[in-house]
Amino acid sequence: VPSSQSPSIAGTALDPTSVRPSIADAEIVRVAPDELRDVLIRLRGEGCTMLLDVGAVDYLEREPRFDVVYHLLALPPVVATVAQVGMPRRVRVLAGVPGSEPRLPSVADLWPSADWAEREIFDLFGITFDGHPDLRRIQLPYDWQGHPLRKDYPLRGPAREATPRPAFALKSNVPAGTPPSGRVAAALQKQRELDEKRPT
Amino acid sequence: VKTPAAIPPPMGVDVVERIGNTMTLSLGPQHPSTHGVLQVVVEVSGETIERAEMEIGYLHTGIEKSAENLFWTQAQTVIERMDYLNPIGNALCYVLAAEQLLGVTERIPPRAQTIRVLMTELTRISSHCVWLGTHGIDLGAISAFWYIFDIRENVLDLVELAGGARMHPNYLRIGGVNGDIPAGYLAKLDELIEKFPQRMHEMRTLLQNNPIWRDRTIDVGIVSPEDAISWSLTGPALRASGIAYDVRKAFPYCGYETYDFDVPTRTEGDAYARFLVRLDEMDQAMRIIAQTRKRLETPGPIMVDDPKIAPPAKETIAISMEALIHHFKLVSEGFRVPPGDVYQAIESPRGELAYYLVSNGNNRPYRVRTRPPSMYNLQALKQMAIGNLIADVVVMIGSLDPVFGEVDR
């Protein structure tokens, strides 16, 4: 039986996008940050009218450290039937962003839907979008420290680690040394009786 | 300690503010009609909205971060909790994306794909039932809620019968489904298929030609096709504006190209059109379910034939050393997924739900990026609300059907 695990996959890839298997999910375009807007404007002119999503990935040890990923879809901006829509063209634009002072030009003026997506990346990855009309945190509180989806941000979060447990969680309502009662006491008693019956 | 001035004040904290002839009001975040926790800050002149801005993030639970720290199979449990009205759809999208990376898409047994189609269409119906019920309550039509939740109970019973839980069954697996449908399942399904058209007819009688309903929804929150494209609307909201883009037709998965169904569209683009599109979608979903029911009569395998991904059958563990080792490895460290990235989309009840998965060759996903349809649909309210009355904000939110588990993740 052929297995997906043979030949065995060992180690971790530093840049998975460069070693991806041949999956026909979209056309892939990799751009530098300064040519991003030109490429997106050109693709929009070619009919990729919808900006489906903007996401980001933190590759931590790779240079450039971040990838900001734009997913485009070619839909007609007029009333269209299933046959007219057909199988629309999908394009994925990946822009590498350096880890020191990460910033990209905003596309919120080209697609209003980029507004929240860019705010989310700013919030969770700390990538600044130049020219965004209203760049604020969106998911997290305004006074949050750090950017949780970065790979060097711990899973439980520094705020949680640093916060001492509340006083009510530290004290028990049973004073220390109180003998067990109720079902616990009954179970212990039963165990003692069994132990006594057991031949040593 | 930060001084309060250093923190920018959130919009709409000052509930009432008067500038010239306009007034700024805050709706929510704890308003029952927002279907979760959404704050809408509107600037009104009289009763007409001149500007609307939304505050989201009240339900942010860091699901994407959690998923990156779980095994490939474990991550599915948190992913199902994003869009809590469509848990199986979320799981399906994630599972399909992971299978693309593993390169096993072609080897998934047809019966497993049929069960997946059946389950996603059942959850589509149950999700639309919640939307229809709550949308009705928002507009004062409470009876619809009770009738449609009867259907939802039947659907959830079927989900529970197959998956073991009503809401988050975690029934799908990378490589197939967790178990075959139990004996007597198809008879139960037949009951639903028989009962459903009558119930849908009742819903249409209650609401579709109801003069109050029509007054509240027709010409409210109109979206033109150009606006729908530029605001990235997908799903029923896009199809109500006339663009028949359905992922099941454009990029078929799970063998949707072999099913016979229509993509309901309208051209008005208002709240009533979105209502009609969703009602028609429920009928189409039941049409697909009836077709899966025929295919499920022939038995077959339900998991991919790959012991490194599929857990061994329980009875083989007692007699086969190899099966025992596979089981131990799968439970203790999961399986590894070849490095790469993939974008996989499905048609969720709310629109194009997609996962952009990145694997670096490890036994945990490196990045799980969701394309949340609710978030993009909801964002369009900023444009849609302008020029409408303040009472219609509730109608527009309801007609977009956002789920905040998915908006905030």
Image (cartoon, coloured by chain):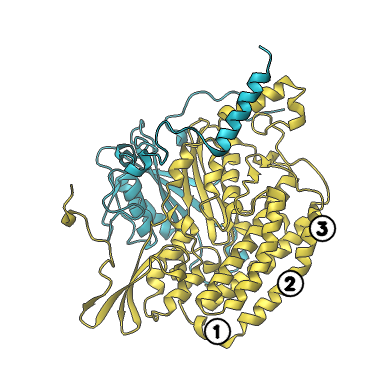
Chain colours: A cyan, B yellow
Query: Quarter-wise, where is residue B251 in the image?
Result: bottom right
Which residue is found at the position 54% from the left and 78% from the top? Answer: B272
Q: What kind of element bears circle 2?
A: helix
Q: Nearer the viewer, mark 1 or mark 3?
A: 3
**In 3D space, how far apart are the residues under numbered discs 1 and 2 (Cα atoms)?**
22 Å
Front-most of B274 and B159? B159
Residue B255 lies left or right of residue A51; in this view the side is right
The residue type indicated by label 1 comes to Arg
Residue B15: in sight, yes or no? yes
**Classed neighbour count for the residue bearing mark 3: other residues with Cα under 10 Å, few (<14), some (14–19), many (≥20):** few
Can you see residue A6?
no
Distance, label 1 to label 3, CA atoms, is: 38 Å
The tag on residue B121 is none
Please say if A129 is above or below A59.
below
Earlier in the chain: of badge 1 and badge 2, it is 2
Residue at the spot 71% in from the left edge and 31% down from the top edge: B312
Residue toward you, A49 or B18: B18
| Badges 2 and 3, same chain | yes
Instruction: Tell me if A196 is positioned left or right of A25 in this view.
Output: right
User: How far apart in space, not on screen, are marks 2 and 3 (Cα)?
Assistant: 17 Å
The residue carrying mark 1 is B214
Residue placed at 65% from the left, 78% from the top? Answer: B204
Label 2 chain ID: B
Earlier-in-chain disc, 1 versus 3:
3
For disc 1, the chain is B
Same chain under badges 1 and 2? The reply is yes
